[in-house]
Image: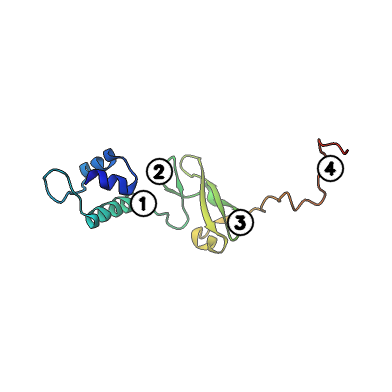
């Protein structure tokens, strides 16, 4: 039923009714409105995949343009994070908005072929400081 489906997927019953308006087919036209689990799963999977816009190589998704865009002037900066991943940062060639994309350092050449990717050093950690700060508000007793 609508209430059971909403409870199972942790959404509001109006969301299920909205899905029904967008093409989710009930088992029959009788009340209470009943849905088949496999057809519901197929509908939700199809609606999720239709909204995806994969980025081809050499592009980053621009939230302002709502499409994958090439970086302005072909310049991209990679900021390392934890482990082998980090953030690719570039300006949108169309609107000038800052774009971000998570990437593995080993796959940068496949994600951004024929582009100049500048790898910036990760910011230093507090533990790695050569001389710890002796500036403290606590007084010795």
Disc 1 to disc 4, how far (Cα)?
A: 52 Å
> Element under label 3?
loop
Tell which circle, 4 or 2, labels the residue nearer the N-terminal end: 2
Q: Position of residue 8 (x, y in %)?
A: 31, 49
Image-based side of 71 in relation to 36, left or right? right
Q: Nearer the viewer, mark 4 or mark 2?
A: 4
Residues at marks 3 and 4 touching, judged by CB atoms closer than 8 Å: no
Disc 3 to disc 2, how far (Cα)?
A: 28 Å
Q: Nearer the viewer, mark 1 or mark 4?
A: 4
Disc 4 to disc 2, how far (Cα)?
A: 49 Å
Residue located beneath label 3 in the image? 82
Tell which circle, 3 or 2, labels the residue nearer the N-terminal end: 2
Kindly identify which numbered label has been placed on residue 52: 1
Image-based side of 132 in relation to 24, left or right? right
Q: Quick one: 110 or 3, which is closer to the camera?
A: 3
> Element under label 2?
loop
Disc 3 to disc 4, how far (Cα)?
A: 28 Å
Residue located beneath label 4 in the image? 134
Image-based side of 125 in relation to 130, left or right? left
Tell which circle, 3 or 4, labels the residue nearer the N-terminal end: 3
Residues at marks 3 and 1 touching, judged by CB atoms closer than 8 Å: no
- Identified at 24% across, 55% down, the residue is 37
Tell which circle, 1 or 4, labels the residue nearer the N-terminal end: 1
Q: Position of residue 51 (x, y in %)?
A: 33, 49
> Among all residues in the image, which is located at the extreme front?
141
Disc 3 to disc 1, how far (Cα)?
A: 27 Å
Q: Residues within 10 Å of mark 1 (few under 14, many from 20)?
A: few
Q: Residues within 10 Å of mark 2 (few under 14, many from 20)?
A: few
Residue located beneath label 2 in the image? 66
Where's the C terminus, which quadrant?
top right
> Among all residues in the image, which is located at the extreme right?
141
Q: How is the image coloured?
A: rainbow
């Amino acid at each position: 039923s609508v209430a059971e489906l909403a409870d199972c997927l942790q959404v509001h019953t109006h969301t299920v009714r909205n899905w029904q308006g967008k093409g989710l087919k009930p088992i029959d036209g009788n009340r209470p409105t009943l849905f088949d689990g496999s057809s519901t799963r197929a509908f939700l999977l199809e609606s999720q995949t239709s909204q995806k816009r994969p980025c081809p190589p050499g592009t980053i998704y621009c939230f302002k343009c709502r499409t994958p865009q090439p970086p302005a002037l072909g310049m991209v900066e990679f900021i390392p994070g934890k482990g082998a991943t980090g953030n690719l940062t570039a300006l949108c060639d169309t609107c000038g908005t800052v774009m971000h994309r998570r990437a593995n350092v080993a796959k940068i050449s496949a994600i951004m072929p024929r582009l100049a990717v500048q790898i910036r050093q990760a910011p230093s950690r507090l533990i790695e400081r050569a001389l710890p700060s002796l500036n403290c508000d606590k007084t010795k007793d």
